[in-house]
């Protein structure tokens, strides 16, 4: 079975891997599926189509979508600037990009809530100047999710920009293209699949995000209550079936969306000759 | 989904660009301004605020918050959790990377996908599944009750949930590296008569040590900082089942801002140390 | 169109890539920039293209000063060493690119573009690949597509950076001939960079030899070969035996029948085919011993050792046609007499 008979340790390594994987991941995760078999279809539909549940889905998916879009736009610019230009403090900024990965989400949550709450540093400023309230609104959730999303986008786009063959740009210019045409017709199409990956990662993370969101969101039912929080609420009310139904739906919708994004990516790559 | 970045050498970022093809100055400076303000707003500002809030009532208040019994027990529990989960997931990561990169077998790509699974599950759901298994109404609930074993709303639940959340970190770091390295060096050692175990320690480990440390570092940061999954299984019992992130939440919800930020500043400090070590490791790995 | 470079200098940090280069390329020529790696030939080509700006000096194309113009305004065609085909575009779109990015008022309509692109693809004999992506092509095919792409904008001059560098030896041979013919048909002023002297001599109508950022010699291939301007060119182009007269070769050269024109220099460069080999009758007067030989197709290269008093074992190479070699019936260790027909003298 193994390709290489002289390499030792196949059985113990694979055996341990499979047992550990099953114990820690597969068996616990499968409970979600088995638990949902306890529900009949009508009960399931009733839980899921509850108005509060539906609006929590709407909040979760729409804020994650908007945040991932915004993070993709700015993340692309950040990656571009970090790869292409040199300026004072660049290495420092480069290291900071991973801060949202490293910072525990609860800390991110209370920090962002403190900044954006109506009495907070930026929250006050935004209310006074533009009359925009961020905290306790979907906008606050979007802000938290942008914070979480930055490294996903920057770190997927950066290596592709770094390895981009500069001769392609030179070729474009030598054929008479302006700088803008070179960017739009040559650079961007080659970076787009990576940007799409970054977007998908950010979106997937945003849908399930909990810690960084709940403090700033205010968790007002029908307005700023996210689906993961509703799962927690149901659990606290010992409504295990309700929690399971919402969790399973979230997982399925996320997987379907990711599948669609993967298909889109496949199509883009194929169209652009990268497959 | 993958939450791990692969190292980029910062030194490589200053790519030598042809002078003739540079972007116009105004474009360059506008983009730099946008990028720097964006990072400043979303990253530097939060970073500064944690530090400011923690010390806003003075060092003494900070210190008294940190020396409270509940805070200390939260720190202890966080350390204990990391101390158990990180080594377990490290051993798993090495074993999985060894099996996947050194052998051909059926279902290998499925296995690689399954290892990533915890990344694509919401932290709350990661906690929920352990409640379904070990909670009062869970599969093993009655049995556990009968034998007086507590998992949910107790330390074992916290450790299990953390184990799940941090499961892929080390493996994800090692698999691409060991794939790229190939096994020629190991074959050479074996052909020279080294034992399998000896080969592993003398050839494989020195080659992967920086990536291994990198994975351990990220795994540890997540293990100490995990909130959502742990929050579901912990039950928030002060002094008993509150990890540091949970204790931060409790303090915050009690309007004890100084206490919340005192705990938060420790975690932020951990994040900063992680970032510094990460940058150093990236350099090491790229200079290899 | 003609190209005129005046007093071009370029430094990269403290490294001086080009120093006071003056070069004139008449219209319609196919010029090779030849030199060892690091001699500045690619930098010079990129300066002509506008991909790099010279620190000093001016670039004129058909009399017009292009020094300050960017690469996209110069109207040159550039073929990159690794082709730099746009990997996200089909072959067709690659070739059409230069036409599609023209300002709206100059842009041909779609029909014209389609016709023109297919005509170019036919010119390079690859129209059947028009809907492929670059990653699906062989090296030689990519090279020809890159050329078609550069030609689409009807450039005033065509610049090629190591056009055959990345190809297999057999493909390279075919493409050289093909490029020469293509140039003959299109008659567009072309410059290509190469480090392969054989390639330069075979393809170019003019060869410019560069070394250490300076032009050593410019001329037709036969000029360069028959009348090398200095020792570097003589050594770089073709094989050469080098005899330093200050040492021990003076007497030996005289026995080999070369007069010693002291005034011209002290170092003699002798091409292998300028050495005549005869079987020695006397043994005493013999000037060399046969050590070994190699078959180079129609030619045989003899490896000889001079019979010096000082025991030097530096080999001397001589070349002769195959039949002649057969007639001589030489064996290893045979004593032979050498007659040197011609030598170039350098200081």
Image (cartoon, coloured by chain):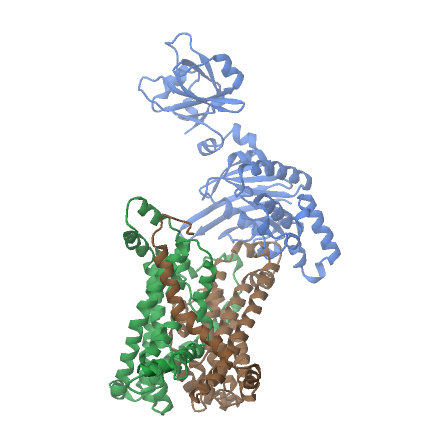
- The quarter of the displayed image where residue B285 is located: bottom left
Q: Colour of chain A?
A: brown
Q: Colour of chain C?
A: blue
Image quarter hosting the C terminus of chain B: bottom left
Q: Nearer the viewer, residue C308 or B108?
A: B108
Q: In the drawing, does residue B215 fall left or right of residue B120? A: left
Please name the residue shown 58% across and 39% down the image: C31
Q: Can residue A97 be seen in this snapshot?
A: no
Q: Nearer the viewer, residue C82 or B137?
A: B137
In percent of width and height, residue A89 lies at: 39, 69
In percent of width and height, residue B12 lies at: 41, 59
Q: Colour of chain B?
A: green
State whether residue B104 is above or below residue B81.
above
State whether residue C167 is above or below residue C233.
below
**Across the whole image, how many numbered discs are drawn on residues?**
0
In percent of width and height, residue A156 lies at: 48, 65
Q: In the drawing, does residue A41 fall left or right of residue A3? A: right
Q: In the drawing, does residue B266 fall left or right of residue C164? A: left
- The quarter of the displayed image where residue B85 is located: bottom left
């Amino acid at each position: 079975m193994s390709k290489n008979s002289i390499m030792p340790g196949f059985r113990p390594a694979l055996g341990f891997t499979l047992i550990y994987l099953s114990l820690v991941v597969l068996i616990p995760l499968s409970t979600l599926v088995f638990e949902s078999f306890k529900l009949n279809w009508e009960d399931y539909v009733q839980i899921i189509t509850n108005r509060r549940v539906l609006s929590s889905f709407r909040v979760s998916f729409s804020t994650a979508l908007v945040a991932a879009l915004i993070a993709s736009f700015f993340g692309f610019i950040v990656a571009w600037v970090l790869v292409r230009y040199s300026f004072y403090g660049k290495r420092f900024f480069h290291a900071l990009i991973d801060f949202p990965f490293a910072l525990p989400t609860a800390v991110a949550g209370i920090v962002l809530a403190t900044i954006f709450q109506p009495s907070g540093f930026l929250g006050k400023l935004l209310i006074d100047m533009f009359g925009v309230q961020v905290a306790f609104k979907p906008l606050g959730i979007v802000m938290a999710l942008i914070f979480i999303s930055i490294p996903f986008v920057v770190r997927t786009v950066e290596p592709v920009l770094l390895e981009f063959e500069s001769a392609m740009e030179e070729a474009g210019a030598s054929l008479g293209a302006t700088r803008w045409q070179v960017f739009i017709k040559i650079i961007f199409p080659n970076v787009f699949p990576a940007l799409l990956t970054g977007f998908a990662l950010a979106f997937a993370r945003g849908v399930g995000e909990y810690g960084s969101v709940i403090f700033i969101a205010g968790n007002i039912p029908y307005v700023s209550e996210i689906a993961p929080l509703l799962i927690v609420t149901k659990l606290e009310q010992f409504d295990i079936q309700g929690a399971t139904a919402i969790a399973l739906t979230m997982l399925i919708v996320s997987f379907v969306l990711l599948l669609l994004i993967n298909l889109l990516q496949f199509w883009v790559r194929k169209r652009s000759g990268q497959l | 989904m993958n939450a791990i970045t692969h190292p980029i050498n910062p030194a490589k970022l200053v790519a030598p660009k042809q002078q003739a093809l540079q972007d116009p100055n105004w474009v360059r400076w506008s983009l730099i301004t946008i990028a720097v303000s964006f990072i400043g707003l979303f990253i530097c500002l939060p970073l500064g605020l944690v530090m400011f809030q923690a010390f806003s009532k003075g060092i003494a208040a900070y210190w008294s918050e940190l020396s409270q019994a509940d805070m200390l027990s939260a720190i202890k529990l966080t350390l204990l959790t990391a101390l158990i989960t990180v080594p377990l997931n490290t051993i798993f990561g090495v074993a999985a990377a060894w099996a996947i990169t050194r052998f051909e077998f059926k279902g290998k790509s499925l296995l690689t996908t399954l290892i990533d699974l915890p990344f694509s599950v919401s932290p709350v759901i990661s906690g929920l599944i352990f409640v379904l298994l070990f909670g009062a109404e869970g599969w093993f609930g009655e049995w556990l009750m009968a034998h007086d074993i507590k998992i949910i709303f107790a330390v074992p639940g916290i450790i299990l949930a953390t184990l799940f959340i941090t499961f892929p970190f080390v493996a994800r770091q090692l698999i691409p590296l060991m794939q790229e390295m190939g096994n020629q060096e190991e074959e050479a050692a074996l052909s020279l008569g080294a034992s399998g175990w000896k080969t592993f320690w003398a050839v494989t480990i020195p080659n992967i040590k920086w990536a291994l440390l990198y994975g351990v570092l990220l795994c540890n940061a997540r293990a100490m900082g995990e909130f959502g999954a742990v929050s579901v299984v912990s039950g928030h019992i002060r002094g008993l089942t509150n990890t540091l992130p949970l204790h931060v939440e409790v303090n915050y919800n009690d309007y004890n801002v100084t206490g919340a930020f005192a705990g938060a500043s420790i975690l932020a400090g951990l994040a900063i140390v992680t970032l510094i070590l990460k940058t150093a490791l990236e350099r090491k790995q790229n200079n290899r | 169109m003609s190209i005129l470079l005046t007093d071009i200098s370029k430094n990269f940090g403290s490294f001086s890539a080009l120093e006071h280069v003056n070069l004139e390329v008449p219209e319609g020529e196919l010029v090779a920039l030849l030199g060892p790696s690091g001699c500045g030939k690619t930098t010079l080509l990129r300066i002509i293209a506008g991909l790099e700006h010279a620190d000093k000096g001016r670039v004129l194309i058909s009399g017009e000063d292009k020094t300050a113009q960017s690469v996209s305004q110069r109207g040159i065609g550039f073929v990159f060493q690794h082709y730099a085909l746009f990997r996200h575009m089909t072959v067709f779109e690659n070739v059409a690119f230069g036409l599609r990015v023209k300002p709206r008022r100059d842009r041909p309509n779609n029909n014209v573009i389609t016709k023109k692109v297919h005509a170019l693809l036919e010119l390079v004999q690859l129209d059947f690949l028009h809907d492929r992506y670059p990653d699906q092509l062989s090296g030689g095919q990519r090279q020809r597509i890159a050329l078609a792409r550069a030609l689409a904008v009807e450039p005033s001059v065509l610049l090629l950076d190591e056009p055959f560098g990345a190809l297999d030896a057999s493909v390279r041979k075919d493409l050289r001939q093909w490029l020469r013919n293509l140039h003959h048909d299109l008659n567009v002023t072309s410059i290509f960079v190469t480090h392969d002297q054989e390639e330069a001599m075979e393809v170019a109508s003019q060869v410019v030899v560069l070394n250490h950022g300076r032009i050593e010699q410019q001329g037709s291939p036969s000029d360069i070969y028959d009348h090398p301007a200095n020792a570097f060119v003589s050594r770089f182009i073709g094989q050469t035996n080098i005899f330093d007269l200050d040492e021990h070769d003076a007497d030996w050269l005289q026995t080999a029948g070369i007069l010693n024109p002291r005034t011209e220099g002290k170092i003699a460069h002798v091409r292998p085919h300028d050495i005549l080999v005869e079987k020695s009758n006397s043994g005493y007067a013999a000037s060399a011993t046969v050590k070994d030989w190699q078959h180079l197709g129609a030619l045989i290269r003899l490896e000889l050792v001079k019979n010096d008093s000082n025991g030097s074992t530096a080999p001397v190479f001589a070349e002769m046609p195959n039949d002649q070699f057969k007639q001589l019936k030489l064996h290893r260790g045979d004593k032979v007499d050498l007659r040197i027909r011609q030598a170039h003298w350098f200081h």
